Image (tube, grey):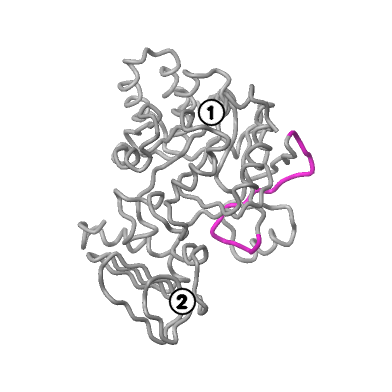
Amino acid sequence: MQSELHRKHFYAVIMAGGSGTRFWPLSRKTLPKQFLDLAGQGKSLLEGVLEHISALVPIERTIIVTHKSLAVETLKRVPHLPPQNLLAEPQSKNTAPCIAWAAHAILRRDPEALLFVFTADHFVSDGVRYQQALERAALAASEGGLVTFGVVPNRPETGYGYIEFGDEIGPGEARRVIRFVEKPDRAKAEAFLQSGRYLWNSGQFVFRAQAILKAIEAHMPELASAFEPLASAKEEELPGLIEMAYAKAPSQSIDHGVMEKAQNIWVVMADFGWSDVGSWTTAWELAPKDAQGNVGEALFVDARRNLVHTSARKAIVLIGVEDLVVVDTGDALLVVPRERSQEVKEAVQRLGGLFPEVL
């Protein structure tokens, strides 16, 4: 769809932070979920993202932004990434500062750059449709719009934010965004699904680097001011300026800071088998299962729809139980009903005062 002239200005920005709490005890502070194979595909979520975008953006124009504590592990996992393409944040301050830094860094290379912004820990099952959606979004963004992806919902999900779209159709068949909606309760989620006017917010974006920095200046002036010195700095000045920028920058998401306020927001409707892989329940849904719906290496006796993961060399037997998550890493054991797996994050926060060594 895009000409080679346009494609040479395509850059990927992969936001790869994470605190390692949702998939504890398998995930840890130094091993967040993007490094794990949670979809049962034989590769990490980060590797899956890189694989899907490689046909559109080469690794030489792929930027990974992560916390400085994860920089070494990230380069170890992606050895073919040019070291200068890893941006190591001095502080974790949500997605707006992350995107602002990436946009400034890429503009130094290419004033015409168009950015595909992804999370490192999502899963896509249909790579062909995914690339088609990216190309449609690029077409819309090339006109100066700020574009996001809305996933066509197939259930009344209460764990995702939603996007309401209008009738206006723009370049790349993008729809004008009417509003963003926070995670709804069950009744609202069911109404959204029935209306056919709402999409799941995937948290992925496409826009020109200049366009997003202009929007940040308009809607997040404090953030724009913090990063403005990077635009004209010499290369050797950058490390110190980045430290100062993050010290001054507000901690806010690009969704709340810009996307919910700007006027030129478009959404590309997509149905490419997307998941944010937000809990052990999602991992169970994505993984290959036996005839009784069980996942993992264990002996299941009259047991159904369970997930077992073990890093230890031991036999695990489940008898007469249903819908459990059992995760054994040797130094920690988790047992939780699948329907309550979202509570793992809260439990890990409480663990800090009891067993900090397993975080």
Which label is found at residue 149? none
Residue 244 is drawn in which quadrant? top left
* Disc 2: which residue: 323
Q: Nearer the viewer, mark 1 or mark 2?
A: 2
* Disc 1: which residue: 216
Residue 285, position as x, y percentages in the image: 52, 66
Q: Secondary structure at mark 1?
A: helix
Choose the circle earlier in sequence order: 1 or 2: 1
Residue 6 left/right relative to 38: right
Amino acid type at image mark 2: Asp
Q: Nearer the viewer, residue 24 or 251?
A: 24
Residue 241 is drawn in which quadrant? top left
Residue 219 left/right relative to 168: left
The magenta segment is 154-171
Amino acid type at image mark 1: Ile
Residue 327, position as x, y percentages in the image: 34, 68
Q: Nearer the viewer, residue 348 or 293?
A: 293
